[in-house]
């Protein structure tokens, strides 16, 4: 006999099912398998009880910051690793320290142009006749600054690794390729890990359901 999810009792932390014969019963959310927990927690029946959830600004902010920190750590590791791989494969420079220094230079250039872009955008915004003109001119200026940033980033590569123009071009081509492959593998790895029950179960329960008091 099949049963349909019809509600959720926040007090008992149980989902409410209704059998084909009309009889309802409760079942602890924590006892569902990982897929069942996710399906139930994202269902409209459970969402209707969100006013009762143990949600505070500090808790949501903490979870968001932790998730962002993990994402940035993975992204930074892949970015630096891609520069290192491209340096070893194309530039013939396997020293990790030199790749790390180049990554630092790229970050400083990015920050500098972001600040410059903000200044330019503020100037155009102050002197523009209307908001539409400010957005249009600001977007054009942002695009130009973006191109200049890429050129500046490229120009420091030959001197940093002591290589010629064409090997620097090869580096520029291989670096994003390695980064894309790394992101694909990392994403696939995370999905596969989430499919392994002890790991997926732990993430769903401890990073989602338990902080909101659903289990």
Image: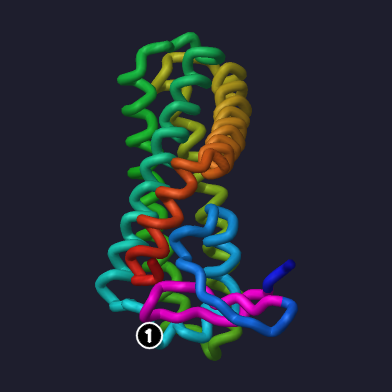
Residue at 34%, 71% (x, y): give it: 213
Residue 144 against residue 123 in the figure, above or below? above
Extent of the magenta region: 4-19
Element at label 1: helix
33 or 165: which is nearer to us?
A: 33
Residue 118 against residue 77 in the figure, above or below? below
73 or 57: which is nearer to us?
A: 57
Q: Picture coordinates of residue 74 (x, y %)? A: 42, 40
Q: Is residue 56 left or right of residue 126?
A: left
1 or 77: which is nearer to us?
A: 1
Q: Picture coordinates of residue 187 (x, y %)? A: 56, 41
Dividing the picture into quarters, in which one does residue 169 lie?
top right
Residue at 58%, 60% (x, y): give it: 36
Q: Picture coordinates of residue 83 (x, y %)? A: 47, 27
Image quarter (top left, top right, bottom left or bottom right) of the C terminus: bottom left
Residue at 49%, 20% (x, y): give it: 85
Q: Picture coordinates of residue 182 (x, y %)? A: 55, 32
Image quarter (top left, top right, bottom left or bottom right) of the N terminus: bottom right
Q: Residue furthest left?
A: 58
Q: Is residue 9 magenta?
A: yes
Q: Note whether residue 134 is visible.
A: no
Which residue is denoted by mark 1 in the rendering? 52
102 or 74: which is nearer to us?
A: 74
Main secondary structure found in the magenta portion: strand
């Amino acid at each position: 006999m099949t049963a349909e999810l019809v509600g959720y009792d926040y007090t008992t932390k149980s989902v409410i099912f209704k059998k084909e014969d009309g009889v309802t019963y409760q079942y602890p959310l924590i006892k569902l398998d990982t897929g069942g927990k996710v399906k139930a927690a994202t269902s409209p029946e459970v969402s209707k009880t969100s006013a009762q959830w143990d949600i505070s600004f500090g808790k949501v902010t903490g979870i968001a910051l932790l998730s962002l920190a993990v994402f940035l750590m993975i992204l930074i590791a892949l970015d630096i690793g891609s520069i290192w791989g491209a340096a070893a494969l194309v530039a013939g420079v396997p020293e990790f320290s030199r790749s790390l220094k180049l990554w630092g230079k790229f970050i400083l250039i990015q920050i500098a142009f972001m600040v410059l872009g903000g200044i330019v955008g503020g100037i155009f915004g102050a002197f523009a006749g209307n908001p539409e003109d400010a957005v249009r001119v600001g977007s054009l200026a942002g695009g130009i600054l973006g191109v200049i940033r890429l050129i500046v980033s490229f120009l420091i590569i030959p001197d940093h690794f002591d290589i010629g123009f064409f090997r620097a071009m090869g580096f520029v081509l291989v670096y994003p390729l390695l980064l894309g492959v790394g992101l694909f593998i990392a994403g696939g790895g995370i999905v596969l890990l989430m499919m392994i029950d002890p790991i997926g179960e732990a993430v769903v329960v401890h990073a989602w359901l338990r902080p909101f008091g659903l289990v």
